[in-house]
């Protein structure tokens, strides 16, 4: 059974300069207990996709088209009141920058208990007990449950944020850059923790990141986004080893691999496009080495390469020779 | 090869901030030993990467070399001469030859200044130009050297009109304009997207090769250090743990801390079954540095000597030093087997 289906999602921001097509016709799905990596550079629409699922968009962000289904529930048609029943209970989020996402004058345990009280019919004592359980689950010292955020290190705060996201046993957790501000050692600890939790709690997990190199160990599937569109999606093996889109290729080359010969990667020329006036045809064509006339004129559809691997390029795999 | 910078037992300390009440009651303020006795030489025309986690003192060390923070003890030699930081003119001369590139190009450029004024500022501070034409010419050359082509297009723009990568190039141009010998680059690409950052890294390597510039490249990312530098120094809690040629440090690491960092280094390949040995806990507080080897509480190989005696940097092989008692232990074991 599909846990999550996103179909032709279009989320646009209406700002004074015009309409920013932040997410433009994005489709993907996630099976029960699966982990999907959603990767791309800043401004590619990865966070907007996540906020659309949870309907946490700012007022100027509007879902203009497409559907989002969580199991059989159509999230896109729910009213603001109805969606609250699903937030946290069905889909929860671990936000970027855990350091700033917490209330500095409230005990960490209270903040976790608050999430429980808000979404479940329980007494304060029961919620506090649940917070204690969650503390153990994310491997935090139970004795520190009465501590304040400033007494916690970055890694500990991120663990507490994860505990909060798990408060109501969600079916799907979305981690938005969950390890970005952390040191490598702590990053590895947090990724291990997320992986273990996903397997023991049998929940779906979406990891949003700009760092393609961290996904090889945790994700089943990877979707690469560029300028509001998914340009390639497939199993981790397909995306790492048999990718077909030139952008995926360039992005991967940007991460040095010590197991391979030392090669200074060529930078991608130019900068990401303005999404108010995106380039015609393929949005990557102005920066692409293999672009031809058709790339300027015609937007490439998704080409299927089998085994759930597809890519949007007129000349897929051109970089192979 | 000539040494550009030589650090001898360099120490930097800070007084830890306390609440007012504690300050009143306590006689002695706790000291943060941010840089705690560092000996390093940086050779002409090399990129030395300084790698460490947050709180390791890597940024403080970079600032101390440039006299942007006061040093508590030790000496800094620049081109084989001790720099006397109390001598104003000497500092001024030194500052022309040693420059810095900061991490965040969104904060390091004055938002109200035109690019031409930002880049020309070091020339004006040092009163090195006489005419407007000369000023323009020098700025254009610096912008060109930093890869902003054609430079005329950037002169009369403001930082907000530029992308992150372009801003970082402006910061590099203003570091280059005085024709320095040595540049401290403090995490110059950590705020940039992957597609942009390779361009900046390539530029640094090109500057090294074309101008013979010397870099101290400060980073938390071992794989970037491996990619661009000649040598790598690993820092932990204010001390250098291991230093050597970049391939040697990555492929034949001796120090357990370096090995732990390598263990958790992300590698862009499929590896579902990689069992990482992740160190538990986090770096201890630098106000309370563990006795003996400062890494011993987290070290999987620690033995009695590590708790008592602080190891010094010693040769593990030629041009490869590590501060670890295991080196002696292993060599003495090898000898006893012979």
Image (cartoon, rainbow, N blue to C red):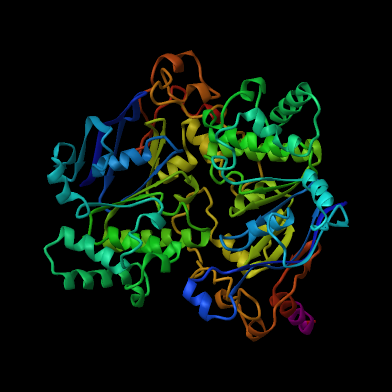
Quadrant of the rendered structure where residue B174 is?
top right
- Whether B298 is drawn above or below B258: the answer is below
Quarter containing the C terminus of chain A: top right
Q: Residue at x 49, y 72 (%)?
A: B20
Q: Position of residue A234 (x, y in %)?
A: 38, 40
Name the outermost residue toward the front.
B24
Residue B111 at what x, y percent from top left? Answer: 55, 35
Give the total of numbered labels.
Answer: 0
Q: Quadrant of residue A118?
A: bottom left
- Residue range highlighted in magenta: B331-337
Is residue B121 among what the camera can see?
A: yes
What residue is rendered at 53% in x and 75% in y? B23
Judge whether A80 appears above or below B149 on screen. Answer: below
Answer left or right for B166 relative to B205: left
Left or right: where B61 falls relative to B221: right
- Look at the magenta stretch and give its main secondary structure: helix
Q: Is B313 inside the magenta-drawn segment?
A: no
* Residue A71 placement (x, y as % from top left): 18, 46
Does the image show residue A264? no
Answer above or below: position of B130 versus B101: above
- Whether residue A287 is situated above or below residue A67 in the rendered picture: above
Front in this rendered view, residue A13 or B206? A13
Q: Measuring 37% from the left and 75% from the top, which residue is drawn there? A: A141
The residue lying toward the viewer, choosing from A64 and A264, is A64
Q: Which x, y percent locates residue B66?
A: 73, 53
Asked if residue B333 is among those painted magenta in the image, a careful observer would answer yes
The reply, left or right, for residue A240 in relation to residue A208 is right
């Amino acid at each position: 059974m599909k846990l999550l289906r996103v179909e032709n999602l279009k989320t646009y921001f209406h700002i004074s300069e015009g309409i920013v097509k932040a997410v433009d016709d994005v489709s993907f799905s996630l099976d029960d207990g699966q982990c999907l990596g959603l990767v791309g550079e800043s401004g590619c629409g990865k966070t907007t996709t996540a906020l659309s699922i949870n309907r946490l968009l700012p007022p100027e962000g509007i879902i203009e088209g497409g559907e989002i289904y969580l199991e059989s529930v159509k999230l896109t048609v729910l009213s603001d009141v109805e969606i609250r029943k699903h937030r946290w209970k069905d889909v929860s989020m671990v936000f970027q920058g855990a350091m700033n996402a917490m209330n500095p004058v409230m005990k960490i345990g209270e903040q976790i208990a608050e999430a429980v009280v808000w979404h479940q019919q329980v007494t304060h004592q029961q919620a506090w007990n649940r917070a204690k359980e969650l503390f153990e689950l994310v491997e935090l010292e139970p004795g520190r449950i009465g501590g304040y955020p400033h007494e916690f290190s970055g890694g500990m705060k991120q663990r507490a944020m994860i505990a909060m996201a798990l408060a109501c046993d969600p079916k799907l957790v979305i981690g938005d850059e969950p390890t970005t501000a952390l040191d490598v050692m702590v990053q590895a600890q947090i990724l291990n923790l997320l992986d273990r939790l996903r397997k023991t709690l049998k929940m779906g997990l979406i990891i949003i990141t700009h760092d393609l190199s961290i996904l090889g160990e945790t994700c089943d599937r990877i979707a690469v986004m560029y300028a509001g569109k998914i340009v390639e999606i497939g199993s981790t093996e397909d995306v790492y080893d048999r990718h077909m889109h030139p952008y995926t290729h360039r992005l991967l080359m940007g991460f040095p691999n010590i197991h391979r010969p030392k090669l200074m990667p060529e930078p991608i020329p130019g900068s990401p496009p303005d999404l108010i006036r995106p380039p015609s045809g393929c949005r990557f064509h102005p920066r692409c080495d293999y672009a031809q006339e058709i790339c300027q004129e015609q937007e490439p559809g998704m080409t299927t390469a089998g085994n759930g691997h597809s890519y949007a390029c007129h000349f897929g795999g051109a970089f192979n020779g | 090869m000539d040494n550009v910078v030589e650090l001898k037992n360099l120490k930097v300390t800070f007084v830890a901030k306390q609440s007012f009440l504690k300050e009143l009651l306590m006689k002695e303020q706790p000291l943060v030993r941010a840089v705690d006795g560092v000996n390093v030489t940086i050779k002409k025309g090399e990129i030395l990467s300084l790698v460490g986690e947050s709180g390791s003192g890597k940024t403080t060390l970079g600032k101390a070399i440039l006299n942007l923070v006061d040093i508590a003890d030790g000496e800094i030699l620049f081109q084989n001469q001790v720099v006397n930081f109390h001598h104003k003119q000497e500092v001024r001369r030194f500052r022309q030859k040693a420059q810095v590139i900061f991490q965040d190009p969104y904060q390091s450029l004055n938002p109200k200044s035109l690019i031409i004024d930002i880049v020309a500022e070091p020339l004006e501070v040092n009163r090195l130009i006489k005419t407007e034409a000369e000023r323009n010419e020098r700025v254009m050359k610096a912008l060109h050297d930093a890869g902003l082509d054609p430079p005329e297009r950037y002169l009369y723009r403001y930082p907000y009109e530029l992308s992150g990568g372009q801003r970082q190039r402006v910061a590099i141009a203003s570091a280059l304009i005085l024709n320095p010998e040595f540049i401290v680059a403090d995490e110059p690409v950590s705020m940039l997207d992957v597609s942009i950052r390779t361009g900046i890294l390539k530029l640094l390597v090109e500057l090294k090769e074309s101008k013979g510039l010397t870099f101290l490249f400060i980073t938390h990312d071992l794989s970037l250090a491996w990619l661009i530098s000649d040598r790598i120094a690993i820092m932990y809690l204010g001390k250098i743990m291991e230093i050597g040629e970049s391939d040697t440090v990555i492929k034949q690491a001796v120090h357990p801390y370096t090995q732990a960092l390598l263990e958790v280094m992300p590698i862009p390949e499929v590896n579902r079954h990689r069992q990482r040995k992740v160190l538990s806990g986090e770096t201890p507080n630098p106000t309370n540095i563990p006795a003996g080897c400062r890494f011993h509480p987290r070290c999987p190989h620690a033995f009695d000597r590590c708790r008592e005696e602080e190891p010094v940097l010693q040769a593990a092989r030629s041009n490869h030093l590590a501060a670890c008692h295991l080196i002696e232990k292993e060599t003495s074991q090898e000898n006893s087997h012979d």
